[in-house]
Amino acid sequence: MTRTVVIGGGFAGLATAGLLARDGHEVTLLEQQDTLGGRSGRWSAEGFTFDTGPSWYLMPEVIDRWFRLMGSSADEQLDLRRLSPGYRTFFEEHLHEPPTDVVSGEAEELFERLDPGSSHALREYLDSGAEVYELAKEHFLYTDFAHPADLLRPEVLKNLPRLAGLLSTSMKRYVASRFRDPRERQILGYPAVFLGASPDTAPAMYHLMSHLDLTDGVQYPVGGFAALVDAMTGLVREAGVQVVTGATVTGLRVDPAPASLRSRLSAARARRRSAGSVTGITYRAAGAGVVGPGGKGTAEVTVPADVVIGATDLHHLQTQLLPEPFRAPESRWNHRDPGPSGVLVCLGVRGRLPQLVHHNLLFTADWDDNFGRIADGSPLAQETSIYVSKTSATDPGTAPAGDENLFILVPSPAVPEWGRGGVRTPEVEEPGSPQVERVADAAITQLSRWARIPDLEERIVVRRSWGPGDFAADVNAWRGSMLGPGHTLRQSAVFRPGVSDPGIEGLFYAGSSVRPGIGVPMCLISSEVVRDAVRGRGSN
């Protein structure tokens, strides 16, 4: 039986561990935090519970596909609710008007109200997005591009000029050439943020995202994304995966390849400083009283492995965990884009907040300044574009009766020096770094003004914040990135790192750092790509 170790218990790690266990591997999954989920965290206090990571349930067929591969289904495992409206938008230059609700399936009517005559352009835009999405699922998402000839299929070749145009044009330019109204442009451009990019840097290919929310709709799993993590964990354990939390991986063990194997390595592998085969990992177990191979009190544990899946930050793994002869130089990352970080704020609020729905987007007028500050590491403006979730609108169990919970995301520069967040409850007072708290305070003030909740601050009974430093410390995120390397042209599709290490036999990667990219559905897809790569390792 193949001994396999998966590093990281986020969505990609859980999904990959489960699929490989179903394939007959003896799988151990190691997670350094005390709970599983990776960036999909959870927090609770005073009867309020919060998701502290992903919150938009999109591409449901992709999530259901993984459950079916595990012998179940999303319907069996989750209580999914369709949101209507899908989200509410507040526009800085229209605060004197009621906010604009976006209802899935009714976008054409909305655009016609915002700019008479624009509904036809939207129909063409969404139809195009649907077509590109189907092409992507069929030919680009579930592949590691290991066999380029696979792309020379009639349907791909027929659409090649169109796809090339979408990859070489920014979402900003693509949208601006079709829509005049700034509100429409922001509704269509905001998905770039969820891709770790901006409308100016994300390729227009990702206009398919608007098809997902404006046509397919937005859903929510009761219990939040924590419920999704728990459902996946249950199936993974049933498949036989040994799950170890509080396990901080300190290094990979790699044996240099014998000359006979080295002579067979491809040119890509030969370019690495050394070539070898993975033989296991070492990790530091939580607690000083751990009993390891060396006896009581030994905290360093070695796990032999024939296959290792790095479902953690790629930069951390390649520059810190690999043995010195195999490490990637830091210079390799100098010209890569980590994507944005963020300041997260969880608020438990007494009383109702009818001004907000489940998902809310607050858009400032000057997006160029907004995204420019994030890209160059400048301090944010006092008011900036933010996202606010009120899960208690759909899931009353996330707050005490009559109260609300809020989750605020403020996209920010990937600057871990901004520090970490803090906690304020009736029992705890642990302030975060001054910079993180300033951003959190400003976001609360902005939400209070824009949504016309004048007493919001005085109604807050619990508060917790996270900053770029938390992402760096908790999930080893490169430069404190919130989502993973951004989906810019140079970091999308075939230009994104692959799932197989080109120089180390038996080492594979999964998750947001590699193909196909950022987001829960993408991480689940990467698990299938990794499984297929592991299956084929003996035939290469």
Image (cartoon, helix red, strand yellow):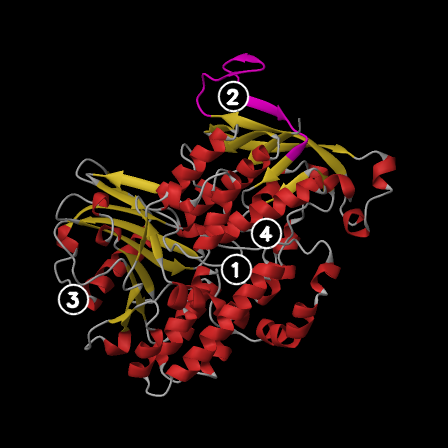
**Are there few (<14), some (14-19), or many (20+) residues within 10 Å of tag 1?**
many
Give the spatial CA distance, label 2 vs label 4: 31 Å
Give percent across and percent down for residue 263: 87, 42
Q: Mark 4 or mark 1, which is nearer the start of the sequence?
A: 1
Secondary structure of residue under mark 4: loop
At label 2, which amino acid type do we have?
A: Ala
Circle 4 sits on which residue? 514
Queried whether the magenta region covers residue 290, the answer comes back as yes
**Are there few (<14), some (14-19), or many (20+) residues within 10 Å of tag 2?**
some
Query: Residue 495: which numbered mark, if any?
Result: none
Marks 1 & 3, CB-CB < 8 Å contact? no
Comparing marks 2 and 3, which lies closer to the viewer?
A: 3
Give the spatial CA distance, label 1 vs label 3: 34 Å
Q: Mark 3 or mark 4, which is nearer the start of the sequence?
A: 3
Q: Quadrant of the C terminus?
A: top right
Circle 3 sits on which residue? 452
Q: Where does the magenta region start and end? A: 286-307
Q: Mark 3 or mark 2, which is nearer the start of the sequence?
A: 2
